[in-house]
Amino acid sequence: MRRKPDSGAERTPERGPVGGSSRGRGAGRWAAGLTAAAAVAFALVGPGVTPASAASGCPGHQVRSVGFATGQLRVYRSGQYVCAVTLAKAPGARRQMSVVLQARGARPVSDSGRFTRLAGPVKVRAANRCVQAVGAISGRKGVSGWFLC
């Protein structure tokens, strides 16, 4: 059975601002105020000021950073785990990127492919073990060497 096109005469009333519930007049003002507050907070803090782990996707604190011609390898530690990412110096076009992380005596864990900004994160359990990380972008690479021994 086909429906008639809507003539506009019998339209349903518009729903409120949040999930279809009508919460009254104050809800719209509250949401607008919250958006304005977020914009002010962003302006005060600045676009590049975020925790390092938020930018990389790795939890914990940064323990090693290796810069190379096309990017940077960053290694983070959180408890018994170590995490690594490779970040491009100039994000943009897709290019071959990879990150490899290995705990001594264990198999390496890697992520590689054609990415625009970062490869990884990769994570290994490294309780009382040395780790080594390698990051590469477009044929250039950075190697951390064995550390956390």
Image (tube, rainbow, N blue to C red):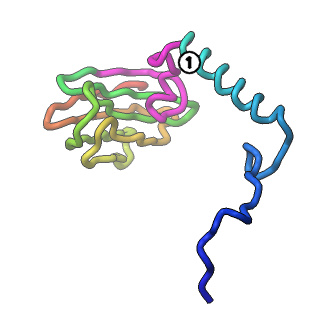
Q: Residue furthest right?
A: 24
Residue 39 image-quadrant placement: top right
Q: Residues within 10 Å of mark 1 (few under 14, many from 20)?
A: few
Examine the image and state in which quarter residue 118 appears.
top left
When asked about the image quadrant of residue 2, the answer is bottom right
From this view, report whether residue 5 is shown above or below residue 13.
below
Q: Is residue 14 magenta?
A: no
Tell me residue 134's x, y (percent).
Answer: 27, 34
Question: x and y percent of residue 101 in the render?
Answer: 35, 39
Q: Nearer the viewer, residue 121 or 33?
A: 33
In x, y percent, where is residue 85?
37, 34
Name the residue located 22 percent from the left edge and 38 percent from the top edge. Answer: 93
Judge by depth and name the residue closer to the eye, 145 or 100: 100
Residue type at mark 1 is Phe
Location of the C terminus by quadrant is top left
**Which residue is disc 1 drawn over?**
42
Magenta-highlighted residues: 45-66
The picture places residue 94, in percent across and down from the top left corner, at 23, 42
Per the image, is 63 magenta? yes
Residue shown at 52%/36% (left/top)?
81
Front-most of residues 101 and 28: 28
Q: Secondary structure at mark 1?
A: helix
Give the residue furthest to the bottom.
1
Q: Is residue 64 left or right of residue 67?
A: right
Name the residue located 33 percent from the left edge and 40 percent from the top edge: 119
